[in-house]
Amino acid sequence: MRRIVIFGNSGAGKSTLAQELTAEHGLAHLDLDTLAWEPTSPPERRPLEVSLQAIRQFTDANEAWVIEGCYADLLASVSQSCNEMIFLNPGVEACIANCHSRPWERHKYASKAAQDENLEMLIQWVRDYETRDDDFSLRRHRALFDTFAGPKREYAELHTAYLRP
């Protein structure tokens, strides 16, 4: 039974890889963006315990799963129960290019126009990945990856064959 955690900067390809794994292996898929934020404008992070409870409900309900996101605090809570970790780290410029070509994320935005309104803010946030010191930063992702003792892979370039080493 596969229990996979995928993380990296925004635009790294987390959702794409998670969807590929879900389709190929019949895994349940959890995008942490769907439970990390209150549905307010501007968005606010949900209390950590509320998000952690939602993750526990998901993992309790699904034996095999893939969980993806950029939230090191949330991912740390499932790192003990996952049996595979994937760190997508293709670099800031590749992530920015991916953000520019991103299709409409219906589960996050009411319209493609609404998504595009946030693009410049997203690009700046992606640019700050290597210098930030928060739960979404390269530093926190590196620490999560480096302390995981199980099977793990890091990809330093974007490509569609993540599944094939």
Image (cartoon, rainbow, N blue to C red):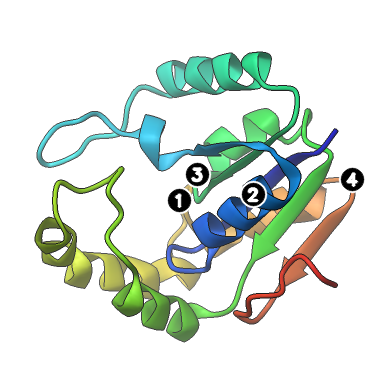
Q: Earlier in the sequence, mark 2 or mark 3?
A: 2
Q: Residue furthest right?
A: 150
Q: Earlier in the sequence, mark 4 or mark 3?
A: 3
Q: Position of residue 74 (x, y in %)?
A: 54, 34
Type of amino acid at the residue the image marks with label 2: Ala
Q: Residue at x 39, y 83 (%)?
A: 97
- Tell me the element at label 1: loop
Q: Residue at x 16, y 66 (%)?
A: 116
Q: What is the spatial separation of the Cα atoms under label 2 and label 4, in whole angstroms?
A: 27 Å
- Tag 4: Cα neighbours inside 10 Å, few (<14), some, or many (≥20)? few
Q: Earlier in the sequence, mark 1 or mark 2?
A: 2
- Identify the mark at residue 149; answer none if there is no mark: 4
Type of amino acid at the residue the image marks with label 1: Asp
Q: Which residue is mark 3?
A: 71
- Tell me the element at label 3: loop
Q: Which residue is mark 2?
A: 23
